[in-house]
Amino acid sequence: MTRILLSLSLFFFSFSLFSQVNTGVKKDSIIKENNLKGKQWDAWYTLDSTWTHHIFPGCLNENHLKLSCADCSKIYLTVQLSIDSTGKLVSHKKISSIMCGDGMSIKMEKCLLDFFYFIEFPSTLRNIILEVKVGNGLKC
């Protein structure tokens, strides 16, 4: 059962990587997370905090990684999230990534993004393209 769910999940993730969806989101409406204000910032901060505390550690474990200054000090994914008017993440565009000094594996990228595909974004974060950096790094 787990293999079936993983296979389906990988299929839909791959499909989202390669499909061009008419989302109704204006392509010129890209908002970077550091430019969010007020209720938009509060909504993103809540989502990001939940992701950082509950999802990110699981992704590290799944990929047999541990943040440390000796081996792996940074894991980041900068991505544009296209969120439609219903609060659904309909597509994403990877801007950059780093995983322990190298490129990020598809498996890790999928793990980092799955949460955002399964949640409903709050009304203040709808019908936009939101550019965010998810992950963590150590000051070594």
Image (cartoon, rainbow, N blue to C red):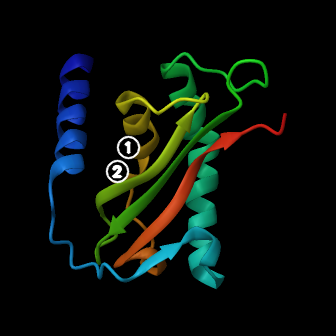
Instruction: Find out whether the residues at labels 2 and 1 contact each other: C-beta distance under 8 Å.
Output: yes
Quarter of the image where the N terminus is located: top left
Residue 133 is left or right of residue 28, and the answer is right
Return the residue nearer the eye: 116 or 104: 104
Residue at the spot x=15%, y=54% of the render? 19
Q: Position of residue 14 (x, y in %)?
A: 21, 40
Marks 2 and 1, how far apart at CA: 6 Å
Q: Position of residue 62 (x, y in %)?
A: 48, 21
How many residues crowd mark 1 within 10 Å: few (<14), some (14–19), many (20+)? some
Instruction: Specify the quadrant of the image occupied by residue 44.
Output: bottom right
Note whether 20 is above or below 58 in the view shown.
below
Instruction: Specify the quadrant of the image occupied by residue 99.
Output: top right
Residue 21 is marked as none
Instruction: Specify the quadrant of the image occupied by residue 75.
Output: top right
Element class at badge 2: helix
Residue at the spot x=55%, y=38% of the render? 98
Residue 94 is left or right of residue 61, and the answer is left
Residue at the spot x=83%, y=39% of the render? 139
How many residues crowd mark 2 within 10 Å: few (<14), some (14–19), many (20+)? few
Element class at badge 1: helix
Residue 69 is left or right of residue 99, and the answer is right
Residue 58 is left or right of residue 24, and the answer is right
What amino acid is labelled 1 in the image? Asp
Depth check, mark 2 against mark 1: the one in front is 1
Quarter of the image where the C terminus is located: top right
Note whether 85 is above or below 88 in the view shown.
below
Mark 1 lies on residue = 114
Return the residue nearer the eye: 23 or 38: 23
Note whether 139 is above or below 95 in the view shown.
above
Residue 118 is marked as 2
